[in-house]
Image (spheres, grey):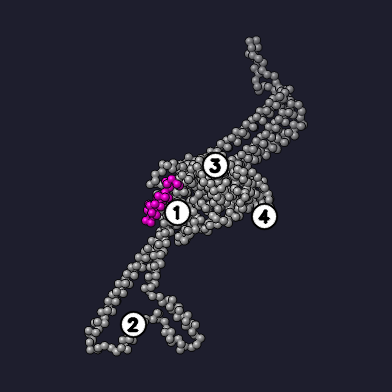
Amino acid sequence: MDMEGFEDENPFEQDLDAIPSATSSMSKVAIYEPSSPPPHASSALSPSSPPHRAAFTSTESHGAQASNYKTDFCCTRDRYLHTNDDIEIVIVDAQKTSAGTSSPYIVYVIRTGDAEARHRYSEFESLRDSLSKLYPTLIVPPIPSKQTIGDYAVKQAKAKEDAALISRRKRMLQTFLNRLARHPILSNEHVFHRFLDGEVSWNEVLNSPPISLLPKNILKAPSHNPTDQNAAAAYSALPNPSAAHPLRRPDQRFLDSEAFTIKFANHMSGPMEKVTRRVVKRWSDYAQDHADLGATLNGFSLNESNELASAIEKTGQAVDTTYVSTTKLLQEVEQNWAEPLHEYTQFASIIKKLLAYRHQKHVQYEMTQDVLENKREQLEELEKSEREARRLEEALGRGRMAGPSSTSSANPEQGEGSPEEDNATSESSSHLPAHPGQNPARRRTRTPGMGLINALSYTLHGMMDVDPETARRNSITKTKESISTLEDALHLAAQDLKYSSSTIQADLDRFQRQKVADLREMGIAMAQAHRDWCKKNLEAWEEAKREIEKIPDHPNKAPGPPETGPSSSTSPGEMAPSPSNRRDSTATVNGR
């Protein structure tokens, strides 16, 4: 793959100050949306607003602490992390223990200043999982991967006690903690501070706020504060979309970020890691071959004497030096090249999930819009039906008022009816049955034992025979309530989308600066490791060369060519000595 073209397509490699606000990703989110939040909400969540941009100060290198002017500290660990420029969290030891359980496990001893804490791998895992839920729009650094089923199958019960695995986890967990300590946002989280405090029970932290307030589904919680309990009712109206749901109006900036992340992940987990594993294996074989060769030469030197024995011994020592230096080179490559490469493969997966979260928030916004538009159309239809029903009712009312007067004028000879007839008519017109079921009075004359069935039948008829006018008005009321709830939900979804887009983009830009600095340090570390390897081998082999030169010349070595001078000129018939006419050491062996 052409790396120049690869970097040219990098959407993170941009000067943020040069991006106009009109073309930024967040300005595109709600320009075409009819139901965007009020202007004050948009300005508060704008990607160019100082509060959000200032939070992500460039660290340039994971070995340098960003300038921090924090003065309000929540605890001693917070003060230590933000008042020292050269902070370093160190995992000083890995100890085997069985405290609290029947089976032994490994705990890692963490030292932060004068504080010591002990945590097992599963607790590191729960810390990272909690931070990912508390900050769904930030890139939380990865921890070393779990062992595969193959590792357990090969090593079985000893898999957790593998010294190489424990050393690797120590280094990568220490990198994880230091990345958190240098993150401009995550370093302020009190959950992280309590993890570094050895006097706090981690189980207590996991079962207390804010972790205990986290919702089951972070998509139905505010992006900036998923533990906000006041927003739970409004967010419950939001849909729960799939990450594969397509967008009608996607943001091209994040499409480019997603495409670049996939390409970056494929390149890291594909060619880079495969070639690195192959190089490490070949260097390992090379070191083992030199270990065998050095032992053989040292044994062979015991069979010889004088200068030859010393020369063979010194050659064996040079081979041993090559073995030792190659072993150290392997360690340097593993620690400063292979492990960071694997870490960035994990980073790529984390960024994919981050972009998927932002994609789901965008889908959530569009789906809420669609539901709101459907509800508004439904309300319009119901209100239209209500107006038509009222007009019809008014027309019928006018017809009933005009009916008696026309009848009395047309038949004056009939006169007034009897009071009994009038009462019967008024009673029949004013008392309408609730539903066209059977008359309850007749049920008394029916067979005993059928009363319960008849009562259930009557109730069922009453439930099914609802007055259309009442049902329509209830539907209008419920639809208006749904529209009000959806409008609030749409407003919250728009705010979440803007906040997620600006925060994710800012952390992606910070990650890009971190990646460039880390790759630079990886390259420098690789070059220094090879330079040291070459220096040590050169010194050893030069010393061996000096010892080899002490061996005397072969006794059958031909004399050198005679010195040419005025008195030693060759005659025309003589031939000048040539290298091909010299007698070499094989002449004695072959008997010539």
Image x and y of residue 169, in percent: 62, 46
Q: Name which of mark 3 and mark 1 comes first in the sequence.
A: 3
Q: Which mark is residue 554?
A: none
Q: Residues within 10 Å of mark 3 (few under 14, many from 20)?
A: some
Give the labeled residue for mark 4: 100
On the image, the x and y values in percent for residue 484 come to 40, 62
Q: Is residue 404 left or right of residue 433?
A: left
Residue 538, position in %: x, y? 64, 30
Residue 529, image quadrant: top right
Real-space CA distance between mark 4 and mark 1, rounded to the nearest whole angstrom: 43 Å
Q: Which residue is mark 1?
A: 496
Total number of numbered discs in the rendering: 4
Label 4 to label 2, Cα distance in Å? 82 Å
Amino acid type, residue under disc 3 in the picture: Thr
**Mark toward the start of the polypeptide (3 vs 4):** 3
Residue highlighted by disc 3:
83
Membership of 32 in magenta stretch: yes
What SS does tag 4 mark? loop
Image point (48%, 84%), residue name: 451
User: Mark 2 belongs to which amino acid?
Assistant: Ser
Mark 4 residue type: Gly
| Front disc: 4 or 1 | 4
Q: Which residues are magenta?
A: 28-52
- The reply to whether residue 404 is in sight is yes
Between residue 317 and residue 405, name the one nearer to us. 405
Q: Secondary structure at mark 3?
A: helix
**In the image, 469: left or right of 323?**
left
| Marking on residue 429 | 2
Q: Residue at x 37, y 81 (%)?
A: 432
